[in-house]
Image: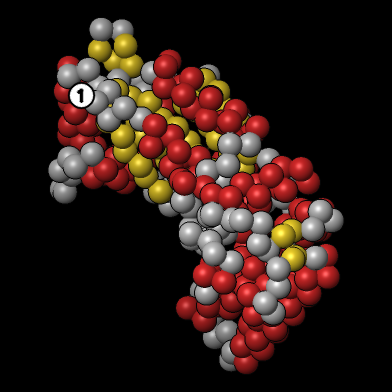
Amino acid sequence: MYDGFYNLNKKPFQLSPDSDFFFNSDIHRRALTYMNYGLTQGEGFIVITGKPGTGKTMLVKQLVNSLDKNKITLGIMVSSQVGADDLLKVIAATFSLSYEGEDKATLLARIERFFIDQAMVGKKVLMIVDEAQNLPKDSLEELRMLSNFEMSGKPLFQTFLIGQKQLGETLFLPEMEQLRQRIVATCQLKPFDVQETKNYILFRLEKAGWQHAPQFEEDVFVVICTYTHGIPRRINALCDRVLLFGYLEELQAISLDVIQKVITDIEEESSLMMDEFQDNLEALPAKSSPNSALEQRIAALEKIVATLRQALTGH
């Protein structure tokens, strides 16, 4: 669509993470440095946190692409509410180890044997846990216990925890003291300021083959940064709509008026969606019992409405 109109090689603001579009901002460079430093240490935990959309998944992709697969055996787990016992099964499955019907002691022995086998051929075992804020405290403690496995005084297992800011809050609970002592480095990804927002937009455009058509006028970047709160995923969503609008209107320049028109359209659409969800909510019959499935459905709808309101207002 607009990529052809503007002679772009690909869509510059797609929402799905593409490592070709990794923007090495100051904070992302620091986080990547901490992760690589953690690898050189070969032990403990590296913790990366940030709001949704700040580039955590892209950061993980960048790290994974740089790993020497001959020296590191990598496992990636996208976390949910996984209890400690199930966590061992997930880890076993991640590394293609059998786990069905096994008790905890057998699983631990099998996992330790795997770690040792990898060390014998000169490989470290690294587990990257994405969305780690969803892990219960007992699962985090289980990961700490796995970090105790050693051979000849050298750790066999290392974990990188990637998650939203709730992860940091959990790690600072008094009962997580022992895990905190194993943390080698932490980094919190922060939103972009105006200059970084501008650099990010131009970087992605140039990566997509942009030849300055359309031209972005200088005053648009402040508004884009303010509206999106400098969060990369929100910047992508807004700029994608801006280029679509530019294509539909056959524009060769993106002005402040264009940005404001697109923002107004987005807010109106979000407001209509919120109204539709609210109407559906009010149309539901009264709850029959405190623990009914209907109550759960209502709660889910209320959560959706709250999420849409947050997306609209940024609060």
Task: Find residue 139 and report its horizontal and vertical position in percent.
Answer: 41, 39
Question: What residue is at 38 percent from the left and 37 percent from the top?
Answer: 65
Disc 1, SS: helix
Q: Quadrant of residue 31?
A: top right
Task: Find residue 196 and report its horizontal and vertical position in percent.
Answer: 71, 42
Q: Residue furthest top?
A: 152
The residue that label 1 is drawn on is 118
Q: Quadrant of residue 99?
A: top left
Disc 1 marks a residue whose amino acid type is: Gln
Its colouring scheme is secondary structure
Q: Is residue 266 left or right of residue 304?
A: right
Frontmost residue, 132 versus 138 = 132
Task: Find residue 307 and report its horizontal and vertical position in percent.
Answer: 65, 66
Frontmost residue, 51 versus 196 = 196
Where 41 sits versus 270, above or below? Answer: above
Task: Find residue 88 and report its horizontal and vertical position in percent.
Answer: 29, 40
Packing grade of label 1 (10 A; few <14, some 14-19, many >=20) is: some
Q: Is residue 190 left or right of residue 127?
A: right
Question: What residue is at 58 percent from the left and 42 percent from the top?
Answer: 23
Number of numbered labels in the structure image:
1
Question: What residue is at 48 percent from the left and 20 percent from the top?
Answer: 37
Q: Quadrant of residue 144?
A: top left
Where 134 sits versus 256, above or below? Answer: above
Frontmost residue, 238 versus 217 = 217
Q: Is residue 148 left or right of residue 12?
A: left
